[in-house]
Amino acid sequence: MVEHQQLDAIFAALADPTRRAMLRQLSRGEFSVGELAAPFSMSFAGASKHLKALEKAGLVTRAIQGRTHLCRLNAQPMHGALEWLRYYENFWNARLDDLERELTADDERKRR
Amino acid sequence: MVEHQQLDAIFAALADPTRRAMLRQLSRGEFSVGELAAPFSMSFAGASKHLKALEKAGLVTRAIQGRTHLCRLNAQPMHGALEWLRYYENFWNARLDDLERELTADDERKRR
DNA sequence: TCTATATTCAACCCTATGGTTGAACATCAA
DNA sequence: TTGATGTTCAACCATAGGGTTGAATATAGA
């Protein structure tokens, strides 16, 4: 079972567009804090805080190499979040099925 | 494409354990605000606020029937969140593959 | 050693959020 | 009509969150 505190941190981390963009960038490889901060019109320290939130959620790990901190994606914790969501997959499929049934019924009506 | 404001609201809504529990409850059927609030040691108005957050994210809809408000799960918006996460699925699988490879290599070593 | 670079830390500001309480509103039932 | 029930609203409080700035730390390079 996924601890729910962990889900708290993960979903909270993902709720910010800056952080989602950083993760997307990290899916392309490792980057220093500076490189990750650059695309955003935001102070360096601000970006650093976002990274801290990502680390707290376990989504990013950091290897300090000299004066630069290399960040790396750790997608693993997302698994729990995805599983949590997947529980509801049937529900939106069910709704889609309903919709489809309705449309089909509509078709039938037209055909008569 | 999923608007990212929507992802903001969805992930933010899911970041709270009370709200996740309410959604879980709603997956079992429709419930009034009072019924949803009952399990939590929290004021009625408090629970009502959580429901408002869920509605804002589009995850809950409400049908007012007399003085009771019947709430219903609308899982649909979760689809976008799940898709967003699924993009990273390969990454944690890749990590698992790495781990497996390492363990296998370890096995090889022992066998010699 | 001196200086420039990469990063964090601490202090602060403002707004959002989770929670409370008490009053208001709407509706059902007597 | 009156009273009980289900719910929201408004005001408030405390804490967290996103952002800033300026100083501090650590390291690389001249």
Image: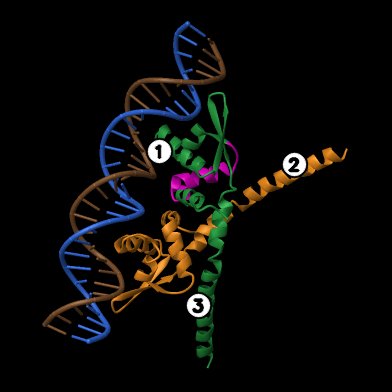
Chain colours: A green, B orange, C blue, D brown
Q: Earlier in the sequence, mark 1 or mark 3?
A: 1
- Whole-angstrom CA distance, mark 1 to mark 3, is 43 Å
Across and down, in percent, residue B93 comes to: 66, 50
- Marks 2 and 1: which is nearer the front? 2
Number of the label disc, if any, that sits on residue B102: 2
Q: Is residue A15 left or right of residue B109?
A: left
For label 3, the residue is A99
Report which residue position mark 1 lands on: A41
Q: Secondary structure at mark 1?
A: loop
Identify the residue shown where x is 35% and y is 62%: B47
Question: Left of A98 or right of it: where is D3?
Answer: left
Mark 2 vs 1: CB contact within 8 A: no
On the image, the x and y values in percent for residue B104 come to: 78, 44
Query: Up-down: is C20 above or below B34?
Result: above
Measuring from the top left, give residue D8's x and y in whole percent. Answer: 27, 66
Q: Secondary structure at mark 3?
A: helix
